[in-house]
Amino acid sequence: MDESFLGFGVGYPFTFANGQLQSASDEALVKQSIMQILATSKGERVMLPDYGCGINDMVFETNNQAVAHQFEYMIKDALGKYEPRIEIVSISATPDSEQRNCLNIAIEYLIKSINSSQNLVYPFYLQGAAL
């Protein structure tokens, strides 16, 4: 199945191989777009000041369930605004049982145009201690 309608662009994070900038396409590009939204702070892009997720502003919060719920809400809002190729199935942020400062964000999504279910886990490291 040709999925080139999902897009083609520069890969994220930016990498070079044999002196050439690496690219991404299709499902990989969608996944990289999600990662970029999560990693971008609001106000970081001058021409799109609202772009991004805002979770980076919470790096000094305590790693607990209340903060995890805030993360879930912020991520759902950001992905809803900036990644129209997906439908969010579920988002869950849970404190890591082994690393006190890690919040594991599991995102399950559906790529609308090809009805393909995908998921990713984004580890976010907080500076506040877990309760």
Image (tube, rainbow, N blue to C red):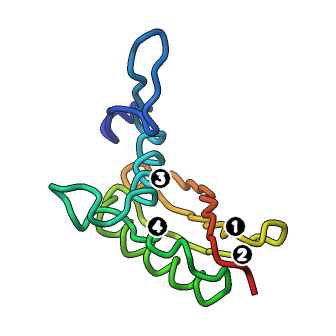
> Tag 4, which secondary structure?
helix
> Tag 2, which secondary structure?
strand
Disc 3 packing (10 Å; few <14; some 14–19; many ≥20): some
Q: Are the residues tagged 2 and 3 within 8 Å (C-beta)?
A: no
N-terminal of the pair, mark 4 or mark 3, is 3
- Tell me where residue 22 appears, x and y as whole percent: 42, 24
Task: Relative to 114, say whether 88 is above or below.
Answer: below
Q: Residue at x 40, y 27 (%)?
A: 23
Q: Are the residues tagged 1 and 2 within 8 Å (C-beta)?
A: yes
Amino acid type indicated by mark 3? Met
Q: Residue furthest right?
A: 98
Indicate which disc residue 19 carries.
none
Disc 4 packing (10 Å; few <14; some 14–19; many ≥20): some
> Tag 3, which secondary structure?
helix
What residue is pinned by disc 1? Answer: 102
Amino acid type indicated by mark 1? Cys
What residue is pinned by disc 3? Answer: 35
* Alpha carbon separation for disc pair 4 and 3: 13 Å
Nearest-to-viewer mark from 2 and 4:
4
Amino acid type indicated by mark 4? Asn
Q: Are the residues tagged 1 and 4 within 8 Å (C-beta)?
A: no
> Tag 1, which secondary structure?
strand
Residue 46, quarter of picture = bottom left
What residue is pinned by disc 4? Answer: 56
- Tell me where residue 1 appears, x and y as whole percent: 44, 32
Left or right of 60 on screen, residue 27? left
